Image (cartoon, helix red, strand yellow):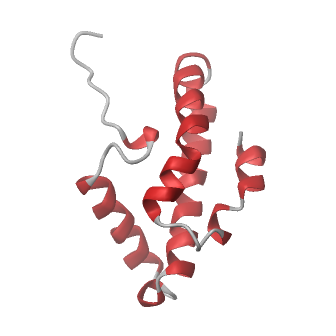
Amino acid sequence: MRQHMRGWRVQRRTDLSLDDLAQWVRPVVRGWVQYYAKFYPSALRCALRTLDHFLVRWARRKYKRLRGHIKRTWGWLKSIRARQPNLFPHWVPVATVGR
């Protein structure tokens, strides 16, 4: 999964907006979440953490105000995640009631 994701070169796609980027990776990540959450959750967590790292690198390249500010960029990503939890499939809150 992680090798496949590295081939996307997400951090280089600064020509895309965050919504475009989410739309671009959503089908693949949704499939990974559906399959690996059931059969190999530890590998899934590692791969999705890698995707978040790539999103931080993308934001630092795209937005001049975030360059050189790793903590600020992680805070920016956290605020985006809080405002739009359905933007990426791995950000969707999972209901634990009734499991």
Asked if residue 17 lies left or right of residue 96, the reply is right
Q: Position of residue 79 (x, y in %)?
A: 28, 63
In the image, is residue 16 above or below residue 89?
below
Identify the residue shown where x is 50% and y is 73%.
59
In the image, is residue 19 above or below residue 34?
below
In the image, is residue 47 above or below residue 31?
below
Identify the residue shown where x is 32% and y is 29%.
94
Asked if residue 41 lies left or right of residue 9, the reply is left
Q: Position of residue 60 (x, y in %)?
A: 52, 79
Q: Position of residue 73 (x, y in %)?
A: 42, 74
Tell me which corner region of the image, top left, top right, bottom left or bottom right, holds residue 8: bottom right
Q: Position of residue 26 (x, y in %)?
A: 52, 41
Identify the residue shown where x is 58% and y is 28%.
31
In the picture, the quarter occupied by the C terminus is: top left
Tell me which corner region of the image, top left, top right, bottom left or bottom right, holds residue 98: top left
In the picture, the quarter occupied by the N terminus is: top right
In the image, is residue 29 above or below residue 75?
above
**Closer to the camera, 32 or 53?**
32
Question: How many numbered marks, from 0 up?
Answer: 0
Identify the residue shown where x is 62% and y is 23%.
40
Asked if residue 59 lies left or right of residue 7, the reply is left
